[in-house]
Image (cartoon, grey):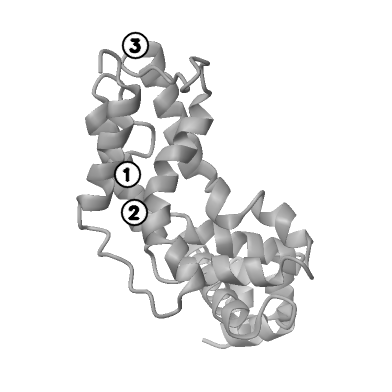
Amino acid sequence: MSVADRDRAETGGDTCQAGYHAQIKAENRARIIRAARDLFLARGYDKTSLAQIAREARVSTGTLFKRYPSKAALFAAVTSEQWQLDVQYAEPPPPGDPRYGLDHIGRDYACLVSRPGTAALCRLIITELPQMPELADIVGTGFAIDRGPFFDRLRDYLDAEAQAGTLDFRSADGQTQPASAVAEQFLGMICGQLLWPQLVRTDFVPPDPTDTTIVDEAVALMLTRYRTGS
């Protein structure tokens, strides 16, 4: 199918059925995201243009601009896609068993940060951020720090465990910490071994995310520190 044919199929018409229509839109989007990610990583954010991405994705510039009116919007879509992962819990696990809940969330996160391309995108942002400050608005305080919906899911789960009385987030001086701060601690223990070394060492081979050791240790430390009655 030519670029023009795909554009006509995406925009619709009397001869296009709704299902076929949706399929073409999904295929175009997947090609655009893949092409944008590959070009951003190969050339850098500043040196990649939307026209180059359209050619690589085999879509018209009109189709591309209709979906992503700016390069920043497309980059935001690329980073968001990188953080999407099929996980066991689309919502936080039910409270009551923090070992079970933290274990499942921790394993999801280990798989997430070990995905191909995650470290490369983080490195790209760190490298180009001084010259392209708009990247900070796209990714918040940092691509590897905010983690978007995944972080929200963990924070909400920790809040629920605290309300259930199974976890108590007191600091060393007795002050109550917010669940967001505790979430950072938990994810940081996993991220520190699976992701951050990749940002400074190109020869670093991260551990297999299916290896339970890193997550097991993070969960054990969290329970020792915050489980009520510990």
Q: Is residue 179 above or below residue 43?
A: above
Q: At numbered mark 1, what does the secondary structure look like: helix, strand or loop?
A: helix
Q: Quadrant of residue 197?
A: bottom left
Query: Disc 2 designates what residue?
Result: 110
Q: Is residue 190 left or right of residue 33?
A: left
Mark-to-mark CA distance, 2 and 1: 6 Å
Residue 191 at x, y percent in the picture: 42, 53
Disc 2 and disc 1 in contact, CB within 8 angstroms: yes
Mark-to-mark CA distance, 3 and 1: 21 Å
Mark-to-mark CA distance, 2 and 3: 27 Å
Q: Of marks 2 and 3, which one's residue comes earlier in the chain?
A: 2
Q: At numbered mark 3, what does the secondary structure look like: helix, strand or loop?
A: loop
Q: At numbered mark 2, what does the secondary structure look like: helix, strand or loop?
A: helix
Label annotation for residue 106: 1
Q: Is residue 57 above or below residue 116?
A: below
Residue 47 at x, y percent in the picture: 73, 83
Q: Is residue 116 visible?
A: yes
Label annotation for residue 75: none
Frontmost residue, 149 versus 18: 149
Instruction: Tell me the kind of residue under disc 2.
Output: Ala
Instruction: Tell me the kind of residue under disc 3.
Output: Gly
Instruction: Tell me the kind of residue under disc 1.
Output: Gly
Query: Disc 3 designates what residue?
Result: 165
**Residue visible at 44% across and 22% down in the picture:** 159
